[in-house]
Amino acid sequence: MVSAHKPHDVIAEERPDGSMILRSAHGMEAPAARTLDWLDRWAEETPRSVFLAERSGPGWRELRYREARDRARAVAGSLLDRGIGPDRPVMVISGNGVDHGILSLASQMIGAPVVPVAEQYALVPEARKHLDDIGARVEPGLVFADDGEKFGPALERAVFDGAEKAASIRAGNWTTFESLEAGGGDISSAADRVGPRTVAKILFTSGSTSKPKGVLTTHGMMCANQEQVAAVLPFLAARPPVIVDWLPWNHVFGSSFNMNLILRHGGGMRIDAGKPTKPLIGATLENLRMVSGTLAFNVPAGFAMLRDAMRDDAKLREVYFRDLDMVMYAGASLPGDVFDDLLEMAREVKGEEPLVTSSWGLTETAPAHLLQHEPPDGSGRVGVPLPGAELKLVPVDGDNRWEAFARGPNVFGGYHRDPDGTAGAFDAGGWFRSGDAMRLVDPADPSRGLAFDGRLGEEFKLASGVWVRAAALRLDLLRRLGGLAADVVICGADRAEIGLLVFPGPEAGSTRADDRGGILVGVDLEAAVADSLAGQTGGPSRRAARALVMAAPPSMAEGEITAKGNLNFGKVRSLRAEIVERLYAGGPGVVEL
């Protein structure tokens, strides 16, 4: 078992206003001034070690540390010659890749923010309005895509008329990535100006509860966050970490956390072009049979799919667990059966358990602010503050329920060109308002850590004035519905009871139902939903009283689903207001519980 600090090393300060401040009792090493200091170090100390790799036919295209540094410097010179800099950022509209990585490092070398966006915005025609919105807000000097043909329609958008376009393959009329690597002028003066306050990235939030905001992510934030993590996970220094990772670089988990963890520790990242979806999980499994990682990052649904595949694949189990030190999940709680099965498989392969853990944070916190760095006694905890990170807990309705506020060197200073949003993000004391609710695992002992308890912005009151804790209820309802539901949206603000909009899952397809004006109507489907939800307990604020099954999936183009794949609950209710009225009026398709 890997080692970490003990969870009781937390300082709790209770304040007269009823709030509580939690801090780590541990310190951390002074962070690097900029992310490229890590790259320079490994380019000299371990020049031949693989930093980034992506699949190329049956094998891998590998980029080693010294080569990465030299190629990034050449691209940085080309960017500088083109006037790319702090006010003319680089925008990337395709997914993870070696060239994307080189371009990001090159941009950071000269103080030019890189703006990675979800590739769905470029590839789904109806979603390109979101690409236009982000492009208009950041005004890039250069826009890059890995495939000029595949992403050509997006590169041709009018919003990019003032930007140079570049592509790695099938460049057509675009600048080739090879020509960028030919190099340019001296970058030393620009590089010398890069420091902790320099913006390295503009990462856009998911937009699940509001319009996506551009988080100004500095070198200082990212460097501090990696030093905070290193302080509580000392095993990372024992050997360079290796990961096989699909998490997208337009999101803070895959980008700022995973990529920088590898760079901080001189490790290697194998870029996985697969994803935890039925069409793409096969690519992930093939990659995992080839490389034994020391760390594994994923969302709970991804770990569940891996668990299912490993049950009947001894080779996959052996390669996956052979060198594994840590499993980290984020985005939701890891189901108990998946948690237990992973540990059992690990014991079978290597005779001991890896650290299975989670973290809490947001794009605005770079991202890790809390981390569960001791073996938990089950799934669901998000841990305690990292060294240097402070958490203020402000009581909200009910016992042992708190709103979380964050402060520390990893916390951002503002949103891109959004002074009103920035002002509203902080309280009078300079604490960042996360909007998340927490509960203490043990109210008598804050050092036991915290558990996530929902997004306060998703909660609402019934007509009776009773609050509905939507996040916890949604998880319970999804558990009860199982394969009948891919996701659900909870309704009921200012109404007498809770209603449910159900987006059907794979099991719903086995029942006969017809589309009637956007909802599915069928006796078998309605009976299956009713049977699944029949065992609910509690009062009106804790149980769904009625449900409708949607005929059409959520639309990314209309903003019902975010680039991360999360539902925007408010947008769904707004765009389907007529269906919500039918839910409460009763009639065909309405399941009354």
Image: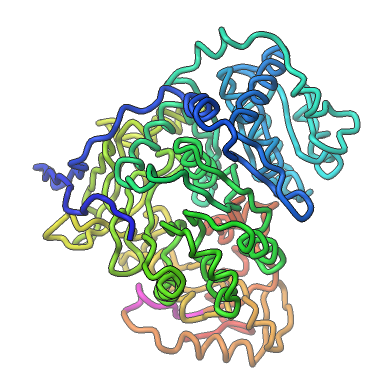
Vertical arrangement, residue 144 with respect to residue 53, above or below:
above
The front one of 445 and 567 is: 445
Seen at 40% across and 25% down, the residue is: 32
Question: Would residue 495 appear left or right of 292 to someone viewing this image?
Answer: left
Question: Would residue 564 appear left or right of 398 to someone viewing this image?
Answer: right
Most distant residue in the left direction = 16
Residue 496 in view of the camera: no
Magenta span includes 436: no
Vertical arrangement, residue 565 with respect to residue 261, above or below:
below
Residue 158 falls in image quadrant: top right
Most distant residue in the right direction = 172
Question: Would residue 391 appear left or right of 157 to someone viewing this image?
Answer: left
Residue 176 falls in image quadrant: top right
Whole-percent x, y for residue 289 in the image:
63, 64
Seen at 49% across and 55% down, the residue is: 297
Quarter of the rendering occupied by the N terminus: bottom left
Whole-percent x, y for residue 544 in the image:
44, 77
Whole-percent x, y for residue 102 in the image:
65, 31
Vertical arrangement, residue 499 with respect to residue 136, above or below:
below
Residue 234 falls in image quadrant: top left
Residue 408 in view of the camera: yes
Vertical arrangement, residue 527 with respect to residue 585, above or below:
below
Magenta span includes 541: yes
Magenta segment boundaries in residue numbering: 539-546
Provide the major secondary structure of the magenta segment. loop
Whole-percent x, y for residue 538 in the image:
31, 80
